[in-house]
Image (tube, rainbow, N blue to C red):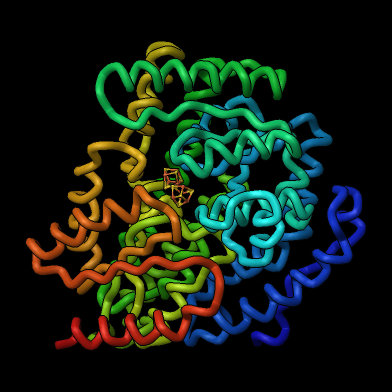
């Protein structure tokens, strides 16, 4: 029953992490309410979602305690903001990696007291969490690793350094041979920095093992995404988005095993004809900027309007798991090269040119059986916003209905977005 679900509070733990406990105390009840309404009132959810519900229940308590215990056992916790930061290296050095991108309106005002207002809400939300001391994940990390993907991020790191040790790696903006060489050098520097923090050297065997662990995680997500493409869908877009968000804060090995359990259940559901929406339900693919927890705004609007989201071309989506790394390497250097090649395939809009992303979006639309694409852009994200022009043209060429929306985490535009989404669904259904 939705009413029995509660996001757990742990003021003693929060206090030990120097959080603003009085203020943060309001967050679990708010998240509880949102989670009940958005997730637990859905009909016919797979039983294996219980594990992911539990991850949300423990998001500010049990999972944080696990990280505190890891630190006590000598395993530093490293926060990241981008899927370009190679988590295989952190894993191989016995560190704990956690994604810190912000998806909440609740910390924006804290950020805007310092940062300009007209930058991306993801950056503001994350920065505000740290400044306001209202995110236990931010409080538990030993250091963060930022990158130079976009202007908002790279300049914010200079300020974030005043609150938490902040390292920055340079991500090239093109994919020429000379850029690939720079990237390999950056990954080698990253490895040295991580080894220094953890006090553990990354050797060939260790890296191979970690590549296999993360490959298994990405393959489980590939398997899950392929199953959810079944028409009719055996799982909702909201639940899929949630799982892809939890991927950034759960223990990789445990997460992989639970995703595979869910896949087994979805296979049984497909075999027995158990679906979350009847055949003929409009199928929508979402592309664009990542949706960090607890940003469920667009999926909630689309699925409440009677459609089902069948794919996320996003870094909290397929960009995170579409590629794996060949773990066979005669040497550590050979493995690092393969690792950097895999990361260079991530088609973030910060690259120019980036036509492979356009092809990838069209391919994913076909594979998922989507009838239309909603391109989601966070306000002030210039690269994704401008890239939507090429995406629209490609969709027009391919005859794929296309809707571009630009929004933030506030609720003021929900009514207007609902109207636009409903009109788009009518267009799709002819
Ligand atoms: S959209 Fe670009 S900057 Fe953002 S997480 Fe993905 S790769 Fe990194
Ligand atoms: S959504 Fe765009 S502006 Fe925001 S952090 Fe990512 S790349 Fe930067």
Q: Is residue 429 visible?
A: yes
Front residue of 279/426: it is 426
Compared with 313, 330 (above or below) is above
The quadrant of the rendering that contains the C terminus is bottom left
Front residue of 71/230: it is 71
Percent coordinates x, y for residue 333 in the rendering = 42, 12
Percent coordinates x, y for residue 268 in the rendering = 38, 72
Among the 4 quarters of the image, the one containing residue 275: bottom left
Percent coordinates x, y for residue 398 in the rendering = 9, 63
Q: Quadrant of ligand 1?
A: top left
Q: Is residue 146 left or right of residue 11?
A: left
Q: Is residue 311 left or right of residue 251?
A: left
Front residue of 186/59: it is 186
Q: Is residue 258 visible?
A: no
Residue at x 36%, y 41% (from the top left corner): 350
Compared with 73, 304 (above or below) is below
Percent coordinates x, y for residue 323 in the rendering = 34, 41
Residue at x 57%, y 57% (from the top left corner): 117
Residue at x 70%, y 24% (from the top left corner): 198
């Amino acid at each position: 029953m939705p009413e029995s679900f509660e996001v757990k509070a742990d003021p003693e733990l929060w206090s030990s992490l120097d959080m603003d406990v009085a203020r943060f105390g309001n967050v679990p009840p708010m998240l509880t309410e949102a989670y009940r309404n958005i997730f637990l009132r859905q009909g016919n959810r797979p039983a294996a979602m219980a594990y992911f519900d539990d991850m949300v229940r423990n998001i500010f308590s049990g999972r944080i305690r696990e990280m505190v215990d890891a630190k006590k056992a000598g395993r530093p916790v490293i926060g990241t903001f981008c899927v370009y930061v190679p988590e295989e290296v952190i894993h191989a050095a016995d560190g704990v990696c956690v994604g810190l991108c912000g998806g909440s309106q609740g910390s924006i005002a804290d950020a805007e007291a310092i940062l300009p207002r007209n930058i991306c809400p993801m950056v503001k939300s994350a920065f505000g969490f740290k400044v306001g001391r209202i995110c236990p994940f931010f409080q538990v990390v030993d250091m963060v690793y930022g990158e130079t993907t976009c202007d908002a991020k790279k300049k914010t790191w200079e300020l974030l350094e005043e609150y938490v040790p902040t390292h920055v790696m340079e991500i090239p903006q093109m994919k020429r041979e000379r850029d690939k060489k720079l990237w390999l050098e950056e990954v080698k520097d990253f490895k040295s920095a991580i080894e220094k923090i953890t006090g553990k050297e990354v050797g060939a065997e260790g890296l191979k093992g970690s590549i296999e662990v993360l490959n298994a995680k990405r393959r489980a997500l590939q398997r899950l995404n392929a199953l959810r493409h079944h028409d009719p869908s055996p799982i909702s877009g909201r639940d899929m988005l949630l799982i892809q968000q939890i991927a950034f804060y759960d223990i990789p090995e445990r997460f992989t095993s639970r995703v595979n359990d869910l896949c087994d259940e979805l296979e049984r559901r497909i075999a027995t004809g158990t679906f979350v929406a009847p055949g003929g339900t409009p199928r929508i693919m979402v592309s664009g900027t990542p949706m960090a927890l607890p940003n469920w705004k667009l999926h909630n609007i689309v699925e409440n309007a009677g459609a089902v989201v069948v794919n996320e071309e996003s870094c909290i989506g397929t960009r995170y798991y579409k590629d794996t790394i060949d773990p066979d390497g005669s040497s550590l250097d050979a493995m690092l090269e393969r690792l950097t090649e895999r990361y260079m395939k991530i088609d973030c809009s910060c690259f120019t040119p980036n036509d492979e992303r356009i092809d990838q979006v069209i391919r994913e639309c076909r594979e998922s059986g989507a009838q239309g694409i909603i391109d989601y852009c966070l306000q002030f994200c210039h690269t994704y916003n401008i890239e939507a022009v090429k995406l629209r043209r490609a969709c027009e060429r391919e005859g794929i209905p296309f809707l571009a929306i630009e929004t933030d985490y506030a609720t003021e535009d929900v009514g207007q977005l609902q109207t636009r989404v409903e009109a788009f669904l009518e267009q799709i259904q002819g």
